[in-house]
Amino acid sequence: MRIRHISIFAAVVLPMGLSAMAGWQVNRAATQVNVGDTVPTEKTAKPEEAPAPEGSVVDEVVWVVGDEPILKSDIEMMRMQGMAEGINWGGNPDCSIPEQLAVQKLFLHQAAIDSIEVTESEIAAGVDQQISRWIEAAGSQEKLEEYRKQTVNEMRSDLHDDFKNQQLIQKMKQKLVEGVKVTPADVRAYFRNLPADSVPFVPTAVEVQIIERSPKIKQEEINRVKDELRNFTDRVNKGETTFATLARLYSEDPGSARQGGEMDYVGRGLLDPAFASVAFNLTDPKKISKIVETEFGYHIIQLIDKRGDKIKCRHILLKPKVSPDEITAAEHQLDSISNDIRAGKFSFEDAASYLSDDKDTKNNRGLMSNATAEGMTSRFQMKELPTEVARVVDTLKVGEVSAPFTMINSKGKTVAAVVRLKSRTDGHKATITEDFQVMKDVVLNKERDKTIHDWVIDKIKHTYVRMNARYKDCNFEYQGWTK
């Protein structure tokens, strides 16, 4: 097997004058990475070089897991994010943070082996929800952009890979534990002698119904977007520029824009149906598709390659802009609908079934669904609801319909919505008769945690790992890092 051989002490060192001018910003590409035929064993490894003086090192590779490096800057970035979010790393963060990064690389490596995939829509939804939370905390999009010194599109681009990796890791973990089961006897045995102060507390759970209205986009705005995409096609066909260049400059899909619009090989089922229908019918890499409308916006597509039942292509995505008056109009529609519901002219369920624009809930009479490890449920803990919905639900009584509000939906679009609190079960100490599922989940999660813990330890045994000497005395959660 051919993998990269990375000197663990490789460091990027700049004279003080140059580093000051560079603003201490170092890129991964600046780290020297050599390609070798095999990973050297401990017997054949070269003697360790003396590390550069701490004050002169801008960045360095401090761990290698398989053929993946962990940089000192990765650790510092994770430490700063943890401080901002109030994360307690447990024990010594100088040891626990690099170990957590190393474990993430084990999961990502296995996810690649197992061909686990996440869709761009899943990534975009997560990114948009994060940015929505930031905007809420900052007070407005303008204040957020001023604080972070980035546009929202730049934030989306920066967050893309992190959210992709998070979702790959989550799916990998789900695959590892999909066969773990517990019986009712296991649950009763676990809780039989459990001290009273250790019985789990069941958080408040709610059932929520929702009606969404998508703001109407003016035809002139749609025409503007289509004209721009037609202009892109003409410029490429005339040889004035390349599709990839235009994608980097103008595409509003942050994940693929940086790659010139290029997407990985993907199956039909992971793509928007309208997108897949056009993309899989392309045969000539020199030609550009017609304009395709999906739930994300408008696209043009260029074929790169087909491999079996998967396709590799480039695309440019443009999203029509929604004006504030269109959002206000959608809110006014919902306000009228809400008043009719309160007046008894029709039920919330009927309104959701016939008037909601949210395909995911309208066929369920507006009832929101929560995907859990056990399957779909209508019950949510407050922290599991979208931020905007949770904030509104927290003020409602059972049966009450909210005033209209705006939110980012699961497709990453700004919509107007009203919600109804269908039920609320206040938090309480779990009992085996009333909360058996909760208690079962506690036991099941312990078994899953053990399965994942054992898998990590076994994976470490079969993975090339090397670390800077200063980490070898750490008290790690997982055994086997030092060999």
Image: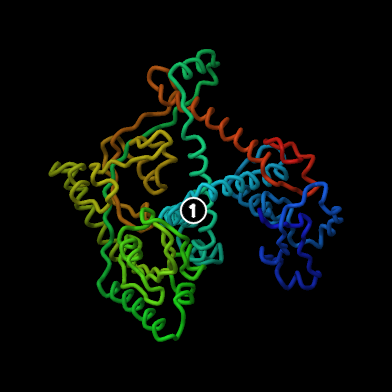
Q: Residue 268 occupies which quadrant of the picture?
A: bottom left
Name the side, left or right, on which 216 lies relative to 39: left
In this rendering, does residue 403 appear at all?
A: no
Quadrant of the frame with the C terminus: top right
Q: What element carries label 1?
A: helix
Q: Is residue 151 above or below residue 85?
A: below
Q: Mark 1 points at which residue?
A: 137
Identify the residue at image location x=67%, y=53%: 67
Can residue 259 be seen?
Answer: yes
Compared across the picture, whether 336 is left or right of 122 comes to left
Q: Which of 35 and 121 is in front in this view?
A: 35
At 52% across and 18% down in the image, what residue appears?
Answer: 190
Q: Position of residue 165 (x, y in %)?
A: 53, 52
Instruction: Tell which of 64 and 432 is nearer to you.
Output: 64
- The amino acid on which the numbered mark 1 sits, given as a three-letter code, is Ala
Give the percent coordinates (x, y) of residue 454. Answer: 61, 33
The quarter holding residue 221 reads bottom left
Mark 1 Cα shell of 10 Å, populated few (<14), some (14-19), many (≥20): few
Which residue occupies the foreground of this view, 245 or 439?
A: 245
- Residue found 27% across the figure and 67% down from its top: 217
